[in-house]
Amino acid sequence: MAEPIRGKRTEITAPTPQNTPATTAPISSHAQQPGVASIQEEDTARAAAASIFAQNPQMLQMIQGRLGSLIGRSSGYVESLPAPVRRRIAGLRGIQKEHTKIEAEFQEEVLELEKKYFAKFSPLYEKRSAIVNGKSEPTEDEIKAGEEEDEEAEAAAEGDGSAKTEKTANVPDDVSGIPEFWLSAMKNQVTLAETITDRDEAALKHLIDIRLEYLDKPGFRLIFEFAPNEFFKNKTISKTYYYQAEAGYGSEFMYDHAEGDTIDWLPGKNLTIRVEAKKQRNKNTKQTRVVKKTVPTESFFRFFSPPKAPNDDDEEDDEVTSHIEELLELDYQLGEDIKEKLIPRAIDWFTGEALMYEEMDEDDLEADDFEDEDDDEDDLSEDHDDDDEESEDDVSHHSL
């Protein structure tokens, strides 16, 4: 199995094309929210239950099986109501069906509206691409409008006491276009940055455009265009996201699967694999040899080889299935971030201004991401001796 993507966000739920969650959380009043005491009691009870189940896994399996058999089953309450009441309930269900039809019409019109305005955006994206790649220059009016926005941003930064960091770019004055525009924009977009390795950057420096196109049926395609480079022969590498034929609850378009182009790697340049070398000793002759094998490795370009959803017939254990589902959610989230964030506001990601509008919810941060300061101090105070001696069975990794 391929190595998991670094820093994956397992809590993400794949949204709909309108960036809404696949399942809508019910609205609750603040009066219903638990207080600190109740949360602590709940945590204590959960820990006690976990301890019991850990000691008796058969009990856990029995309870899980029982709960699974209850899903979708009626409690019997509705069936016990008088016939006139049941008729009214049936009538409400009929009304709900009409509501669902209207919701489906709404979602279809929203998608068509997206396509309509995307057609208006497309000339702007083409103009942006021409400027980025040195084929044209912005007009004086466009430059003036951009400079006015810079002045407003600088004034706002001075007002809140933000310090401006001075950096000097090692770029000649006569350079064509904007060097490494898309690579820089991607590295500022958090979810994308987590997938880009140092080796990937050498290839992504040749990325000259990222485009979007809608499919005839619900879905979209992301197209990455590259200048000639020493890594692969492809001029473009695309990835297509498809939605399910059946609408989800609320008539939203639901993500089904994604397909990516095959990358035609040049010899020894495949960034999605590495060569692993291992020493072996013959038990009889005592001679040693080095055995090399190719194994998957982290890379942004694995984005074009999306994970496959497990089938109902697959005999995968729950842990493997859960891991695949997490990868699928992350994969779709990356596609949505490129579609909804990176492409529309690429210049803001390039400059880093878009980061000011990204909200980091504390709920998105896991407890494992934090450490006590005292622990850090203890770690710094300890002396760690590195063992430089390598055994014959040690593995060394060599980049292609």
Image (tube, rainbow, N blue to C red):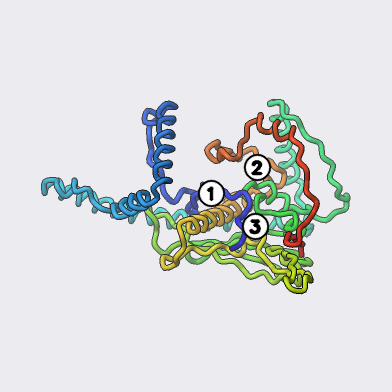
- Identify the mark nearer the N-term, 3 or 2: 3
- Identify the mark nearer the N-term, 1 or 2: 1
**Alpha-carbon neighbours of circle 1 within 10 Å: few (<14), some, or many (≥20)?**
some
Can you tell which quarter of the image residue 357 is in? top right
* Numbered mark located on residue 354 in the image: 2
Spatial distance from mark 3 to mark 2, Cα to Cα?
A: 22 Å
Q: Nearer the viewer, residue 296 or 142?
A: 296
How far across and down, in percent of the image, does residue 134 sit?
79, 57
Spatial distance from mark 1 to mark 2, Cα to Cα?
A: 23 Å
* Numbered mark located on residue 10 in the image: 1
Which residue extends farthest left? Answer: 83
Q: Nearer the viewer, residue 5 or 236?
A: 5
Amino acid type, residue under disc 1 in the picture: Thr
Q: Mark 3 or 1, which is nearer the eye?
A: 1
**Alpha-carbon neighbours of circle 3 within 10 Å: few (<14), some, or many (≥20)?**
few
How far across and down, in percent of the image, does residue 376 sit?
68, 33
Amino acid type, residue under disc 2 in the picture: Ala
**What residue lies at 62% left-to-right and 55% top-to-bottom?**
5
Q: List the residue tagged with mark 3.
A: 123
**What residue lies at 66% left-to-right and 32% top-to-bottom?**
375
Amino acid type, residue under disc 3 in the picture: Pro
Is residue 23 found left or right of 295 in the rendered image?
Answer: left
